[in-house]
Amino acid sequence: MKEIRIGLVGAGWMGKAHSSAFLDAQMLFGPDYGTAVFEMVADTNEASAKEAQHKIGFQRVTTDWKELVTDPDIDLVDIATPNAFHYEVAKAALENGKNVYCEKPLSISPEESKELAQLAKEKGVINYVGFNNTMNPANAYVRELVQSGRLGKIMRFTGTYDQDQLLDESLPIIWRHINKLAGCGALGDLGSHLLSVSQFIMGDIAEVNAMATTVFPKDLRKLDPLKWLM
Ligand SMILES: NC(=O)c1ccc[n+]([C@@H]2O[C@H](COP(=O)([O-])OP(=O)(O)OC[C@H]3O[C@@H](n4cnc5c(N)ncnc54)[C@H](O)[C@@H]3O)[C@@H](O)[C@H]2O)c1
C-alpha cells in the first residue's frame, strides 16, 4: 500500500476541506490509489497549524512553509493559502521535486501559472489545481454526453455560480477583499469555477466579450494589506 505523505500549507477553510477529501478518497476508492499520511502542516498562524495537528492528526507543525517544501519526508505539497502566496510556495515545492496540489488560482498572473506548469513538466511531477467543480459527477456526465456527440452540435452554454458567503456587510475584511492578496474580486474567485466547468464540457474558449459591474462598490485599494492579514 503506497503512502502519500502530505504537507499542508495554509490550515484554513480549504486546508481542512482538502484534508477531509484525502480521508474520503480512501473510503470511497480504497487504498489502491495510496493512503494519506498527514506529515506536516505549515501556517503563519501557529494556533491554526496546531489546531490542524490536533484535529486532523498532522505529525509535525511549522510556521515556516520553506521548512515544509524542502522536507525529504513530504511527497505532496498541498497549498491552501491566500492566492498571492501560491506562486512562491508552488515554485519552491516543484523545484524540490514535490507533487503539488494548489488551490485555485494557481497564481495571480498567467505568466507565473505557465512557468509553474512548465516547471512541473520538467520535474515530472503532478501540478493539480483545485478547480473541484469539474469533479462533480453531473458535470462529468454532461461532458461525456457532449463529447460522445449524443447531444448533437452544442449551440450554447449557460451558467451561473451563486454564492452569498460575503453578502453580510458586518463581516470583517479579509485577504479576499484585498486585490494585492486575492489578485481578483468575486468574478475571478467564483467566475473561474464556471469557466473551468465550461472548458471541461465544451473545450477552450476562443474569444471573450463581457459586461461587468460591481454591485456594492467600495474602494479598498488604499488599505495596507499586511495590516489586514494579521
Ligand atoms: N476550490 C474552491 O472551491 C475554493 C473554495 C474556497 C477557497 N478556495 C481557495 O483556497 C485558498 C485558501 O482559501 P481559504 O478560504 O481556505 O482561506 P482561509 O483564510 O480560510 O485560510 C488561509 C490560511 O492560510 C494561512 N496563511 C496565510 N498566509 C500564509 C503563508 N504565507 N504561509 C502559510 N500559511 C499562510 C492563514 O493563516 C489561514 O489559516 C485560496 O486560494 C482560495 O481561492 C478555493
Image (cartoon, rainbow, N blue to C red):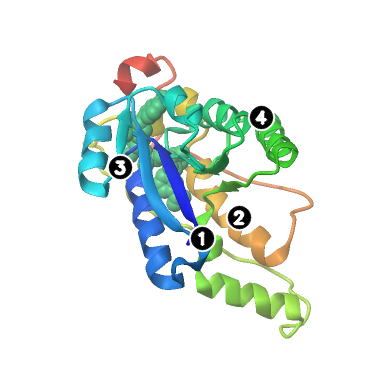
Per the model, the C-alpha gap separating discs 3 and 2 is 31 Å
Which mark is drawn over residue 112? 4
Residue 215 in sight from this viewpoint: no
Nearest the camera: 179 or 222? Answer: 179
- Tell which tag, 4 or 2, sits nearer the viewer: 4
The front one of 119 and 58 is: 58
**Viewer-nearest of discs 3 and 1:** 3
Name the residue beneath numbered marker 1.
133
Relative placement, left or right, of 165 versus 87 is left
Mark 1 close to ligand 1, CB under 8 Å: yes
Please tell me which residue is depicted at 27% across the width and 48% down the height of the picture.
Answer: 56
Name the amino acid type tagged 4.
Glu
Q: Which mark is residue 230?
A: none
Amino acid beneath label 1:
Asn
For label 4, the SS is: helix
Q: Is mark 2 within 8 Å of ligand 1?
A: no
The residue that mark 2 highlights is: 196
3 or 4: mark nearer the eye: 3
Residue kind at label 3, given as amino acid type: Phe
Q: Which of marks 1 and 4 is nearer the N terminus?
A: 4
- Given the image, on which type of amino acid does mark 2 rest? Ser
Q: Residue drawn at (33%, 23%), measured in percent from left and top?
A: 229
Label 3 Cα neighbours within 10 Å, binned few <14 / some 14-19 / many ≥20:
many
In this orientation, which residue lies closer to the viewer: 19 or 36?
36
